Structures are given as structure tokens and as C-alpha cells.
């Protein structure tokens, strides 16, 4: 059987919050013509920043996450503001969450976090030459600890569960695919 695009027949907003909207979509199968309902999360695009310092470290942020009720190690990141491009958002998030600015920027890759029910994309950027510029300016609900970890420690942190955020794993896979991180075999 060959997969074909479905015809969307309409959407109805069920909930609107500050981070996402919940919508109910109706779509028709091209194979049998039947209509099916889908619940969707409509979200802003997201950015992640792999920030490398001149000394060969990578900036990590640790913060409490309401979804899991736990502290997590991540990389700087956040959602795009209305009218903001991904690179602009990446620069803003790095400075707000860590107080650092970087000399060089390049895109590493883009993923769709969960296309089964989300519409957004996560853009990952490499920031080279990250240096402390000023104080952190986190959002009101953020309390962020910053750590500069040796880049060579990242594979172990990914393997042993110290880093559990899926989009952070994706960011480091993007870096490894470019030859910037040797993931190597597991322990």
C-alpha cells in the first residue's frame, strides 16, 4: 500500500493557552474516503543552542520541569516569539538563560518533535566562542543553573540518563553527524 496525503476538512479550537492550542481536526482518507478525527497540539517552533566555549566546554542548563516534576539537564532553548526567526530566537534564548553571547552561529538541523499530533519544528544551532556577557535574564517561571561541561563528557551524560530531554539528544546527534561530537560505543 502506498501512503498518500489526506484531505483536511476542518479544525475546531478546543483550548488556547500561552504555550499551545489544542485543536480537533477532521480529515478524509484518500484510500477509503472515510473521515477521522485527530487531536492536535498547535505550538510555536522551538530553538535549541549547542553553545561551545573557547575552552572546549559546552553550556548546559538545569531547571525544574513541570511536565516530569523533576530537574533536568538541557541546553539553552525556547520557543520563538511572534515574528521572530529561529536564529534570532536562538541568540535571545542563549543570552537570557545563560548570560552568554557567541561569536559564530550555524544551523545544525531541524526536527519535528512529534508529527503525529504536533505541528511545530525544533531548530538546533551551534554557537561557537560563547563567552559570559552579562547576567541571566530568565523568564518569570524559570530558575536556571548554568554549567560548563567538557564536550567529551556529553556522550556519557546521554548514555547514563543524566540528560533525558529528547530534543537535547537530537541536538547532540546533529552535532555528531557533523563530526563535532564522537558518540562512540556504549559502556
Image (cartoon, rainbow, N blue to C red):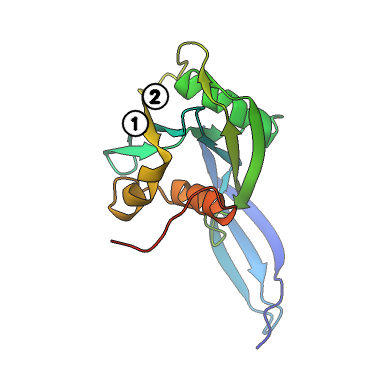
Which residue in the protein does label 1 denote?
A: 63
Which residue in the protein does label 2 denote?
A: 142
Outermost residue on the front side: it is 55
Q: In this view, does 136 lie above or below 106?
A: above
Mark 1 secondary-structure assignment: strand
Give percent across and percent down for residue 5. Answer: 71, 71
- Whether residue 81 appears in this view of the structure is no
Give percent across and percent down for residue 10. Answer: 69, 58
Q: Residue at x 38, y 51 (%)?
A: 155
Nearest to the observer: residue 146 or residue 58: 58
Outermost residue on the bottom side: it is 1
Depth check, mark 2 against mark 1: the one in front is 1
Q: How many residues crowd mark 2 within 10 Å: few (<14), some (14–19), many (20+)? A: few
Give percent across and percent down for residue 75. Answer: 45, 36
Choose top left, top right, bottom left or bottom right for residue 141: top left
Mark 2 secondary-structure assignment: loop
**Looking at the image, do the residues carrying marks 2 and 1 touch, with CB atoms under 8 Å apart?**
yes
User: What whole-number distance in Å separates the C-alpha atoms at marks 2 and 1?
Assistant: 7 Å
Choose top left, top right, bottom left or bottom right for residue 58: top left
Q: Residue at x 71, y 76 (%)?
A: 4
Nearest to the observer: residue 27 or residue 65: 65
Amino acid at each position: 500500500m502506498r501512503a498518500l496525503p489526506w484531505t483536511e476538512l476542518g479544525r475546531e479550537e478546543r483550548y488556547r493557552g500561552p504555550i499551545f492550542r489544542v485543536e480537533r481536526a477532521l480529515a478524509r482518507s484518500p484510500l477509503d474516503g472515510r473521515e477521522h478525527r485527530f487531536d492536535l497540539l498547535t505550538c510555536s517552533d522551538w530553538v535549541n543552542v549547542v553553545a561551545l566555549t573557547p575552552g572546549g566546554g559546552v553550556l548546559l542548563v538545569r531547571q525544574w520541569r513541570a511536565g516530569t516534576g523533576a530537574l533536568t539537564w538541557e541546553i539553552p532553548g525556547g520557543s520563538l516569539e511572534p515574528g521572530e526567526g529561529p536564529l534570532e530566537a536562538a541568540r535571545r534564548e542563549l543570552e537570557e538563560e545563560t548570560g552568554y553571547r557567541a561569536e559564530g552561529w550555524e544551523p545544525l538541523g531541524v526536527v519535528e518533535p512529534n508529527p503525529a499530533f504536533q505541528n511545530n519544528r525544533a531548530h538546533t544551532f551551534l554557537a561557537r566562542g560563547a563567552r559570559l556577557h552579562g547576567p541571566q535574564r530568565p523568564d518569570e517561571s524559570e530558575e536556571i543553573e548554568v554549567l560548563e561541561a567538557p564536550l567529551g563528557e556529553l556522550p556519557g551524560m546521554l548514555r547514563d540518563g543524566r540528560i533525558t530531554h529528547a530534543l537535547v539528544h537530537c541536538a547532540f546527534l546533529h552535532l555528531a553527524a557533523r563530526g563535532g561530537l564522537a558518540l562512540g560505543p556504549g559502556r
